[in-house]
């Protein structure tokens, strides 16, 4: 079965943003972090959101993730409007529909890798007996099967990011959101992580995933993404289809 | 999130800040301990009083008197039992053998004994004392009335033996002699005895009677003569200043076996009344009967039945209701004072959890990013408060138990040094253990409401940015 068929809504879109705005009030001023952005991400597509710092790319990613709510407009994830969801439904969306990878890994330092990766399964109330197999499988996929009992502080940056990817994938979400996944890594390790994400997008076998990646490195975006959307001052400045 | 996962995560989080959380838990434990220690003493004192009253038969004994024979000021006379109002419509009856059998046949009545009490002079050369003497039924041996008895109970129902109350023993003995030294000695009782007069036809022909006579002859009249009899002291009860000694309806200085007391034919107060009221009745007439019920709960029904028969009854059940009210209020105040420490501890929980929110702000953001709902975060903080409450409650009960034991021990040592008995004034019933732990958990959960809702409301984007 084609990847796009499994993750798309009726129009073949994994994500659709319709005139989405996110404004903040700061004192008397209104900050337009995102302003009336309309965007469609097709199922199975690798989209890179490119832009300078403060361009609104991370805010847009947070809106797609359901971590934040738009001031106006609609965001449809697999056909369901996130703006109309209750906070419980948004939590389920974050737990099951998407997986998030952060620039600073965001692993819980007091937990081992195994426990960190198990967290989304706990929140999804996956039966206890099922969890160890799924955790091991996710860690195996990112090459950390031998480090399950290690704490994040005992791992390199690249290993921590790989563990974060394993955590993002353990609930088998259809969409992977990555916010500057290589921002805290050296270029060699960054390449390794990007190879890993590319492999998740289009695996050698089995279903792939929609990937939306925020980055400020054009070269990285050009190398891996199907399409680049450049943001500037909270709005789309340019769209380029590469593949 | 499932309860098991929630508890596991909560326990893990608590372990991470072990010192701070242990101190908070200790605060709860101290609060619970003060509550348990105070209430255990309140409960212990209440049980002590209940035991003493129950042992003395005050709860399960009903005193029955003929209605018309009850003078003002006697139990059942001036103090009218409300149940007697119902008996006003029933004609008064004589308290005779038939009535005794009828009462004995009532449900839940264990035994019916005549009340034998009289004033006598007790003599142990060179000392003499006026003393109230009472007949004691064999059942008193096991009723707990004679707890702390030195010596033994009567060897048989007809044994010419006496048990002497500790204070009376001291008065009969020379100064400095311990009450127990009275054991085995013979004392003489001098009392007023009924002696039946012979029928008028024989009166002129025979000498005045000099023997005790049976009740059948009383219809013909009796004379009152002084009489003496020796008894061996078989037992001595603890003296009242050591907290012992029997109390109750038959409280007296010297006790005889009931059957022996009956055979003495001692003049009773009621004899004169009976003489003046009617000389035509047959058989034994009792001044009063003591009815022992199978349990205090059965006393009210027995009293009603007795009132319906035309007699006056009296028990202490109604009086002791006030005692129970007093202890309920006493325990309430102890509980309030004990809870104050727990209230202070609850502030500690709030402080600890608010600190935890600040420290774990980023962690809360990560949990939310991974799919934790506000409810999950709230429940996690609740679970942490609950675990601290549970641990503090369990530890507090143990601590309170130890404090109660220490107070009991110190009290016992003090009372023994004062030459008094050391009763158990401390008790930790199961309801107190479970109640204290549950109370600690509830107080902790209530304290967790504010921090938990504050954590749940955290904006995940802001929380993830927090360094």
Image: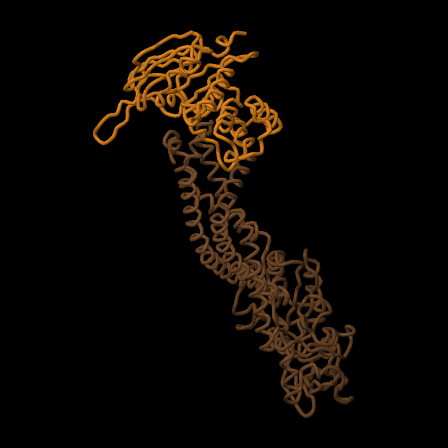
Q: Is residue B348 left or right of residue B319?
A: left
* Chain depicted in orange: A
Asked if residue B283 can be seen in this view, the reply is: yes
Q: Is residue B440 left or right of residue B56?
A: left
Give B103 or B198, whichever is nearer the viewer: B103
Which quarter of the picture shows residue B209?
bottom right
In the rendered view, tell whether residue B130 sits above or below residue B87: below
Q: Which residue ends up furthest to the left in the rendered image?
A: A28
Colour convention:
by chain
Q: Is residue B443 left or right of residue B240?
A: left
In the rendered view, tell whether residue B75 sits above or below residue B172: above
Q: Return the x and y of residue A73 as percentages of the image width and height.
A: 32, 17
Q: Return the x and y of residue B57 as percentages of the image width and height.
A: 63, 65
Give B36 or B323, whichever is nearer the viewer: B36
Q: Return the x and y of residue B201 as percentages of the image width and height.
A: 76, 83
Which quarter of the picture shows residue A64?
top left
Asked if residue B88 can be seen in this view, the reply is: no
* Chain depicted in brown: B
Q: Return the x and y of residue B386 as percentages of the image width and height.
A: 50, 43
Locate the C terminus of chain B and report the quarter of the image it occupies. top left
Q: Which residue ends up furthest to the bottom in the rendered image?
A: B126
């Amino acid at each position: 079965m084609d990847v796009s068929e499994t993750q798309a809504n009726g129009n073949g879109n994994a994500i659709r943003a319709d005139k989405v705005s996110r404004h903040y009030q700061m004192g008397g001023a209104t900050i337009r972090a995102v302003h009336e952005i309309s965007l469609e991400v097709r199922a199975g597509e690798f989209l890179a959101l490119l832009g300078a710092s403060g361009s609104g790319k991370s805010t847009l990613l947070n809106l797609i993730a359901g971590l934040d709510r738009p001031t106006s407009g609609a965001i449809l994830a697999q056909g369901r409007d996130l703006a109309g969801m209750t906070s419980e439904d948004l939590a389920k969306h974050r737990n099951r529909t998407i997986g998030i990878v952060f620039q600073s890994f965001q692993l819980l330092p007091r937990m081992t890798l195994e426990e960190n990766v198990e967290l989304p399964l706990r929140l999804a109330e996956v039966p206890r007996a099922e969890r160890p197999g799924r955790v091991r499988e996710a860690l195996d996929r990112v090459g950390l099967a031998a480090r399950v009992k290690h704490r994040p502080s005992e791992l390199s940056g690249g290993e921590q990011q790989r563990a974060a990817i394993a955590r993002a994938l353990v609930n088998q979400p259809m969409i992977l959101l990555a916010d500057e996944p290589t921002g805290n890594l050296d270029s060699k390790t960054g390449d390794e992580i990007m190879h890993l994400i590319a492999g998740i997008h289009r695996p050698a076998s089995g279903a792939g995933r929609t990937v939306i990646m925020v980055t400020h490195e054009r070269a990285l975006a050009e190398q891996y993404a199907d399409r680049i959307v450049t943001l500037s001052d909270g709005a789309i400045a340019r769209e380029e289809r590469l593949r | 999130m499932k309860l098991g996962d929630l508890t596991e995560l909560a326990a893990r989080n608590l372990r991470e800040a072990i010192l701070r959380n242990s101190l908070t838990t200790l605060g709860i434990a101290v609060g619970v301990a003060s509550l348990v220690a105070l209430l255990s003493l309140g409960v212990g004192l209440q049980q002590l009083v209940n035991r003493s009253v129950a042992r003395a038969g005050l709860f399960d004994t009903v005193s029955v008197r003929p209605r018309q024979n009850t003078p003002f000021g006697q139990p059942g006379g001036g103090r009218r039992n409300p149940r007697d109002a119902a008996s006003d419509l029933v004609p008064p009856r004589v308290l005779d053998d038939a009535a005794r059998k009828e009462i004995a046949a009532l449900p839940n009545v264990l035994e019916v004994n005549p009340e034998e009490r009289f004033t006598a002079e007790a003599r142990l050369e060179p000392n003499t004392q006026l003393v109230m003497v009472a007949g004691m039924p064999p059942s008193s041996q096991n009723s707990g009335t004679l707890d702390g008895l030195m010596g033994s109970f009567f060897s048989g129902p007809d044994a010419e033996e006496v048990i002497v109350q500790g204070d009376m023993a001291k008065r009969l003995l020379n100064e400095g002699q311990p009450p127990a030294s009275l054991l085995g000695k013979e004392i003489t009782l001098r009392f007023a005895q009924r002696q039946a007069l012979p029928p008028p036809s024989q009166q002129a022909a025979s000498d005045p009677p000099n023997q005790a006579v049976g009740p059948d002859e009383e219809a013909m009249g009796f004379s009152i003569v002084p009489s003496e009899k020796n008894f061996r002291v078989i037992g001595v009860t603890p003296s009242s200043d050591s907290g012992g000694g029997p109390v109750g309806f038959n409280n007296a200085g010297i006790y005889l076996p009931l059957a022996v007391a009956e055979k003495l034919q001692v003049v009773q107060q009621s004899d004169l009344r009976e003489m003046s009221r009617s000389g035509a009745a047959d058989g034994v007439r009792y001044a009063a009967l003591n009815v022992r019920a199978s349990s205090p709960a059965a006393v009210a029904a027995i009293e009603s039945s007795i009132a319906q028969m035309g007699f006056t009854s009296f028990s202490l059940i109604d009086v002791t209701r006030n005692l129970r009210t007093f202890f309920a209020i006493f325990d309430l105040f102890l509980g309030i004072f004990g809870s104050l420490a727990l209230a202070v501890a609850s502030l500690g929980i709030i402080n600890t959890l608010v600190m935890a929110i600040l420290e774990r702000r980023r962690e809360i953001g990560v949990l939310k990013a991974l799919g934790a709902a506000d409810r999950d975060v709230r429940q996690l903080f609740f679970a942490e408060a609950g675990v601290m409450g549970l641990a503090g409650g369990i530890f507090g009960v143990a601590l309170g138990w130890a404090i109660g034991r220490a107070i009991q021990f110190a009290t016992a040592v003090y009372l023994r040094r004062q030459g008094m008995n050391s009763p158990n004034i401390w008790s930790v019933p199961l309801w107190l253990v479970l109640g204290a732990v549950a109370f600690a958990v509830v107080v902790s959960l209530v304290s967790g409401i504010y921090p938990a809702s504050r954590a749940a409301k955290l904006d995940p984007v802001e929380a993830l940015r927090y360094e």
